Image: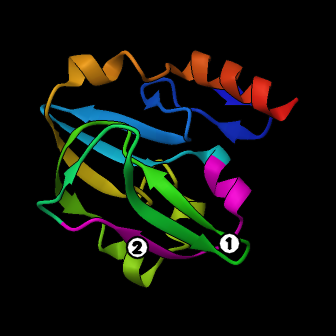
Amino acid sequence: MKYQDYEIPDELLYSREHEWVRLEGKEAVVGITDYAQKQLHEVVYVEVKGEGSGVVQNETMGTVESVKSVSDVFSPVTGKIMKVNKELGDSPELLNQEPYGKGWLARVSLADFKKDKGRLLTAEQYAQYLETIEE
């Protein structure tokens, strides 16, 4: 799906803070959306809580620094960080180049996805949400 110039893959779920979630078994791969990376512009630094750290839905799990600003990244799910994308340390620009691919932030083992899912948006709902904030 596309909304204006923003890619919004149908198979992912989204938060209102512009993070995405891809379910893989009992884990979720988490990243920031195409909309978020375009708002940030050129990403120069990424920091995510360490592996083994607990994260809570809608609470800070890291920061993304661009030439324009520093933004918090909020966890779209509750659980424990199993893996952090270490490639972003040397190549933070992957967030701009491939926000839904090589630019992922972390893998999180899910604590209670049924509860988390109620606060996430489908691609269509996220596109509608972008409409309301772009007006």
Task: Determine which residue is flagged by label 1.
Answer: 42
Q: Is residue 42 magenta?
A: yes
Q: Any mark on residue 24, and which?
A: none
Q: Which residues are magenta?
A: 36-50
Crowd band around label 1 with a 10 angstrom C-alpha radius: few (<14), some (14–19), many (20+): some
Kind of residue indicated by mark 1: Glu
**Looking at this view, is 79 or 21 the one in front?**
79
Task: Determine which residue is flagged by label 2.
Answer: 88
Quarter of the image for residue 88 reads bottom left
Q: 63 left or right of 36?
A: left
**Looking at this view, is 92 or 67 the one in front?**
67
Q: Earlier in the sequence, mark 2 or mark 1?
A: 1
Give how far across and how far down residue 49 sits, in percent.
28, 65
Residue 57, above or below 3: below
Element class at badge 2: helix
Quarter of the image for residue 77 reads top left
Q: 30 left or right of 107?
A: right
Number of disc labels: 2
Crowd band around label 2 with a 10 angstrom C-alpha radius: few (<14), some (14–19), many (20+): many
Kind of residue indicated by mark 2: Leu
Residue 90, above or below 36: below
Q: Is residue 33 magenta?
A: no
